[in-house]
Image (cartoon, rainbow, N blue to C red):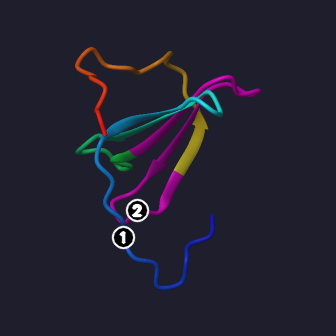
Amino acid sequence: MALKPDGELCKIREQIIDDPVSGLSLQFVHKPGSDAPFRLFIYGNLPNGNREILFDQNGAEAGAGTALAGSRRPSWIAKVQG
């Protein structure tokens, strides 16, 4: 992992972003109480399966691996008109 020297924290809301060009979906999740409470799920037609990247309280990478669950698209999701 490489951290930017004097890198600032960036705030990202929980959301799902679909990128029709790449066919990927990115999901940002917050799981309070976990050692790695911030997670990024990457879903799509990836050669080694869907991915999960975990971040600690300070925003540093805390781990990564194959996302074992299927699509995590929740029932509450609604498309935002921009």
Q: Earlier in the sequence, mark 1 or mark 2?
A: 1
Q: Which residue is mark 2?
A: 59
Q: For this view, does 49 lie left or right of residue 47?
A: left
Q: Which residue is mark 1?
A: 9
Whether residues under marks 1 and 2 lie with C-beta atoms below 8 angstroms apart, the answer is yes
Image location (x, y in percent) of residue 73? 38, 20
Image location (x, y in percent) of residue 10? 36, 65
Q: Amino acid at mark 1?
A: Leu
Image location (x, y in percent) of residue 50? 61, 27
Q: Quadrant of the N terminus?
A: bottom right
The front one of 15 and 81 is 81
Image location (x, y in percent) of residue 13? 28, 48
Residue at (51, 57) in percent of width and height:
61
- Depicted 30 relative to depicted 24: above or below: below
Q: Quadrant of the C terminus?
A: top left
For discs 1 and 2, the disc positioned in front in the rendered view = 1
Q: Which residues are magenta?
A: 39-62
- Depicted 8 relative to depicted 60: above or below: below
Residue at (46, 42) in percent of width and height:
40
The circle on residue 60 is none
Q: Residue furthest front?
A: 82
The front one of 55 and 24 is 24
Residue at (46, 85) in percent of width and height:
6
Q: Amino acid at mark 2?
A: Gly
Residue at (33, 38) in percent of width and height:
15
Q: Provide the secondary structure element on which disc 1 rests.
A: loop
Kindly indicate the quadrant of the structure image that contains residue 42: top right
Counting other residues with Cα less than 10 Å from the Cα at mark 2, is it few (<14), some (14-19), or many (20 or more)?
Answer: some
- Depicted 70 relative to depicted 32: above or below: above
Q: Provide the secondary structure element on which disc 2 rests.
A: loop
Q: For this view, does 30 lie left or right of residue 63?
A: left
Q: For this view, does 41 lie left or right of residue 59?
A: right
